[in-house]
Amino acid sequence: MRAGARLLAVGWLFHFKMLSRSAFDGLLGVMWPLFFATVAFFMFRAGGGEETLLYASLGAAVMGIWSVTSTSAGAAMQRERWQGTLEVLVASPAPFALVLLPVTIAMTTIGLYCLVATLIWGRLLFGIDLHVVHPLLFALSIPVAIVSIGTFGFLMAVAFVRYRFAWALGNVLEYPVWLICGFLVPLTLLPDWVRPISWLLAPTWGIRAIRQSALGGSPLPDIALCVALAGLYTLVGVLVLETALRAARARAALSLT
Amino acid sequence: MTSLRIFAIGGLTSYRALFYWLTPYVYVPSLLVAPIFQILLFVYIGRSAGLESDEFYVIGNALQYAAIPCVFAMGFAISGERYQQTLGPILVSPARRLPLFLGRAVPVILNGAFVAAFSLVVGGLLLGIDVPASALGPLALVVLVSAFSCTGLGLINGALGLRVRETAVLANIIFGLLLIFTGANVPLDELPGWMRAISDLVPLTHGIEAARLLADGVPLASVDHLIAQEALVGVAYGFAGYGLLRFLEWQSRIHATLEMA
C-alpha cells in the first residue's frame, strides 16, 4: 500500500517536472484556452451579459485543464510506445496502472497554469473580478477536479491502447467535452439526451464544484460526485488495462508494429 | 518545362510522401469531425450569449477551420522534410524554389477548401441553415480563395520551420489568433479598433464576411471586392512566406543552422 502510494506520488512529480520542461509546449498549453476564453469573453460581453462573464470566466479557466488532458492523455501510452519504454514499463514488477495513472494526472495538473492564466487574463483584459464565496471549498474543489479529470484521462489512455492514432481521438474529444460539460454553455440549453452523458463525465461536476464554491452554493455534493467518478474511472481503467495487457501479451501486439 | 514538372508532379509527390500518415484514422477525427464540434460549440455559446444567429457561427467556424489543414500542412512541408532527413538534399538541389514550394501548396489549398466546404455543408445541415441554391457556386469560390489565402499564411509558418523546431505549436497559435481576429465568432464591430485594424490584414476575415453575405442572398457582384481583398491578402502572405523561405535558407547556409532547429 505504501509502495503503491509512493509510486503514485513519485510518478506524478517525475512526470510533472518532465512535462514542464518544454517552454514552447507550456506556452501553447497556457495560450490555447486563452484564445477560446478571449472569444467567449467578447461574445458574452457583446451579447450584453456582463453578469455571465464571471460564469464564463470560471468555465474558460477549467477548459484548459481538459485541453491538456484530452490532447495528451489519450496518447499517453502511444508516447511510451514511441519512446520505446512501454514494453519495459509493462514488464516491470510494479502494476502498470500505478505507472500510468500518475502520468495522466500530471498532464492534468499542467492545466493549473491554464486555470490561473485564464483568471488573470479575464481580470486584466476584461475586468472580471473573482470574489470567492467559499475559499476553502474552492481550494478543495480545484485539486478534486484535477484528479477526477486526470483519472478520466487515464480511462481514455487505456481505452485507446489498441489505437495507433490515439492522439487524434484525444484531440477530437476536446470540443465535445467543453460543450456538454457546461463549461461555457448551461446544460439546460443542450438537448435533453445530452444531459445523461454529461452526468457521467467528471468535468461536469468539477466545473460545478468550482463554480458553486466561487459564486456561492453547496459544492460538497459535486465534490463527492467527482471523487466517486474518479474511483469509478480508475476501477474501470484498471480492469480494461489488465484485459488489454493480457491480450497484448498473448498476441505479442503491445508495440502495434 | 522542368519548373512546371517540379510544380505539379513534385508538389503532388511530396504531399503524398510527407502526409503518408494522414490515414482515415487521423483525417476523419481531426479534419472532418473536429470542425463540426467547433461549430456546435460556438453555436451554443452564441445562443447562450444571445449574440448572433446559428448561420453566423456555422459559416465563420467552417471557413476558419481551413486554418488547420492549411497552416499545419505548410509548416509540415518543411519540418516533415527535416524529420525524414530530406531537407538538406532538397535545398542543395538546383531546382527553382518558386515551383518547388508553390507546388507543395496546391494540394494543401485543395484539402483546406475541402475541409471548409465539408464543415459548411454538414454544419449547415445539422443546424438547418438555409442557403439559396444560387449562392452555392459563389460560396465554393469563396471557400477556395479563403483556403488559398490561409495557405499563404501557412507558407510563413513553413518558412519559420527552417529555423524553429515547433511548427505545429506555431500553427496552433496562428489558428488561435485567427479564431479571435477573423470575426469568425465575434462581430468585427464588437472588437476594439486596433483589433479591427489587424482583422483587415489577416486571411479569412474578408472571405468569412463574403460567405455570410452570399448566404444571405447577396449577389456575387456585390461581394467581389471582398473576394478580391481575400485573394490579395493571400498573395501578400504568399510573397512574404516565399521571401522568408529564401532568406532563412540563405541564413541557414551562412550559419549552418539547417539541422539546428
Image (spheres, coloured by chain):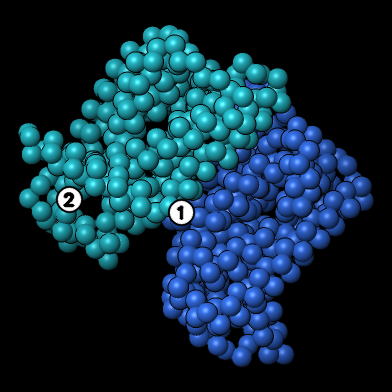
Chain colours: A cyan, B blue
Kindly report which numbered mark, 2 or 1, lies closer to the viewer in this rendering: 1
Residue A5, position as x, y percentages in the image: 13, 35
User: Which amino acid type is marked by label 2?
Assistant: Leu
Residue B21, position as x, y percentages in the image: 44, 65
Q: Where the N terminus of chain A falls, by quadrant?
A: top left
Classify 10 Å Cα crowding around label 2: few (below 14), some (14-19), many (20 and above).
some
The chain letter under disc 2 is A
In the picture as drawn, the residue positioned furthest to the top comes out as A217
Front-most of residues A4 and A230: A4
Image quadrant where residue A184 sits: top right
B174, above or below B104, in the image: above
User: Which amino acid type is marked by label 1?
Assistant: Phe
At 50% across and 69% down in the image, what residue appears?
B79
At 45% across and 22% down in the image, what residue appears?
A195
Position of B224 with respect to A228 (left or right) is right
The chain letter under disc 1 is A
Image quadrant where residue A2 sits: top left
CA–CA distance between discs 2 and 1? 34 Å
Position of A156 with respect to B137 (left or right) is left
Front-most of residues B82 and B163: B163
B252, above or below A126, in the image: below
Q: Is residue A27 visible?
A: yes
Lower position in the chain sequence, tag 2 or tag 1: 1
Q: Which residue is mark 1?
A: A24
Position of B96 with respect to B77 (left or right) is right
Front-most of residues A190 and B145: B145
Q: Which residue is mark 2?
A: A245
Which element type, helix, strand or loop, lies under badge 1? helix
Q: Is residue B19 visible?
A: no
